[in-house]
Amino acid sequence: MSKNIVKVLDKSFSDMKAGQRMLISSPEKIAKYINQIHLGSSKTIKEMRLDLAKSEDADNTCPLTTGIFLRKAIEELGDDLPYWRVIDEHHPLIKKLNLNPKKITKLRVDEGIQ
C-alpha cells in the first residue's frame, strides 16, 4: 500500500493557507476510505479530504491529487468500489470516466442517498 505524505505549504494553495499541513494521499487510501462509508451514507469530496487529513495529523488533503487518485481508484476497481457514495451524477469525473449518470443516480437512490 502506498505511503501517505504530509507537507507544510510554503504558500497558499486552493482552499489551504501557507503553513498548513497538506496530506498527499494515495488511490489505495482513498479506496479504503470509500469502502468504509456505510451503506446508505455519503460524503462530499471535501469531507473525505478533511477526514483523510485528520487521520494523518494534517490540516487538509491536496485537492488536485485527491481528484487524480479518486479517478485512478474508480478506474481500477469499478463497481467493486462504491464510488457513488462520494460522487453524484453531476460530478466532473462522470464525463472523464465515461460513467453513466443515470446508473449513479439509481445506485444512490437504491441506497437511500440523495
Image (tube, rainbow, N blue to C red):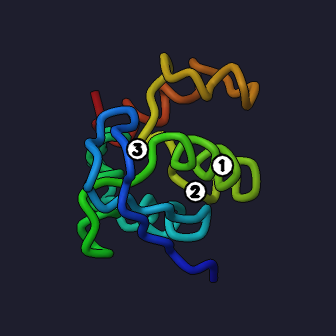
Q: Are marks 1 and 2 in contact (CB under 8 Å)?
A: yes
- Return the x and y of residue 8 as percentages of the image width and height: 36, 62
- Amino acid at the residue labelled 1: Ile
Upstream in the sequence, badge 1 or badge 2? Answer: 1
Name the residue beneath numbered marker 3.
Answer: 85
Q: On screen, 7 above or below 97?
A: below
Where's the N terminus, which quadrant? Answer: bottom right
- Amino acid at the residue labelled 3: Arg
- Amino acid at the residue labelled 2: Leu
Q: Are marks 2 and 3 in contact (CB under 8 Å)?
A: no
Disc number placed over residue 81 in the picture, else none: 2
For residue 13, which quarter of the picture?
Answer: top left
- Return the x and y of residue 47 as percentages of the image width and height: 26, 46
For label 2, the SS is loop
Tell me the residue at 53%/29% (across/down).
104
Which label lies toward us, 1 or 2? 1
Tell me the residue at 28%/66% (across/down).
58
- Return the x and y of residue 79 as percentages of the image width and height: 65, 50
Q: Label 1: how many residues lie within 10 Å, few (<14), some (14-19) or many (20+)?
A: some
Name the residue beneath numbered marker 1.
Answer: 74
Which label lies toward us, 3 or 1? 1
Q: Distance between the residues labelled 2 and 3?
A: 9 Å
From the viewer's side, name the closer residue of 81 and 108: 81
Upstream in the sequence, badge 3 or badge 1? Answer: 1
Tell me the residue at 69%/27% (across/down).
99
